[in-house]
Amino acid sequence: MVFKKLFQALTGSGSKEADSNKAASADPITYKDITITAKPLSEGGQFKTAGTISQSINGELKSTEFIRADNHSSFDAAVEHSVNKAKQIIDERGSSLFDSERC
């Protein structure tokens, strides 16, 4: 059931329940020519670390989404942690970030 809710939250499919899990997106920021958009998920009165990492490569927009188990009591704290987590992902994966067929 938990995986179903996470999938629905990511894809935007499913019931009104999935829509209620979505919180607002923060303003995008640029880090190493890659765009980070924090999109914390609202769940049980808290916000889960989540977001999108995207970059235009040869005129094609590539993006990947991430969700972490970290919960925060405020939207702003979740945004800050989501941005930091995205930077960590970018630093760790480097140019291979958009190599997978998921993007």
Image (cartoon, rainbow, N blue to C red):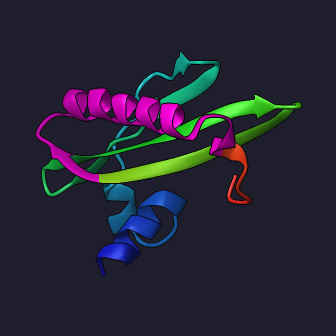
Q: Classify residue 5 as left or right of residue 42.
A: right
**Percent of width and height locating residue 54:** 63, 35
Q: How many marks?
A: 0
Residue drawn at 49 percent across, 38 percent down: 92
> Is residue 17 part of the magenta span, yes or no?
no
Identify whether 75 is placed above or below 7. above
> Is residue 72 part of the magenta span, yes or no?
yes
Identify whether 47 is placed above or below 1. above
- In the figure, residue 87 lies in which quadrant? top left
Identify whether 12 is placed above or below 96. below
**Percent of width and height locating residue 96:** 67, 43
Residue drawn at 32 percent across, 52 percent down: 68
* Quadrant occupied by the N terminus: bottom left
Residue drawn at 52 percent across, 49 percent down: 65
- In the figure, residue 73 lies in which quadrant? top left
Residue drawn at 37 percent across, 36 percent down: 85
Q: Classify residue 70 as left or right of residue 13.
A: left
Q: Classify residue 37 as left or right of residue 69.
A: right
In the current view of this chain or complex, which residue is farthest to the bottom? Answer: 1
Q: In front here: 88 or 41?
A: 88
**Percent of width and height locating residue 33:** 64, 19
- In the figure, residue 93 lies in which quadrant? top right
Please give the range of residues in magenta.
69-97
> Would you say the magenta stretch is mainly helix, strand or loop?
helix
Q: Classify residue 91 as left or right of residue 5.
A: right
**Percent of width and height locating residue 17:** 32, 67
Identify whether 13 is placed above or below 92. below
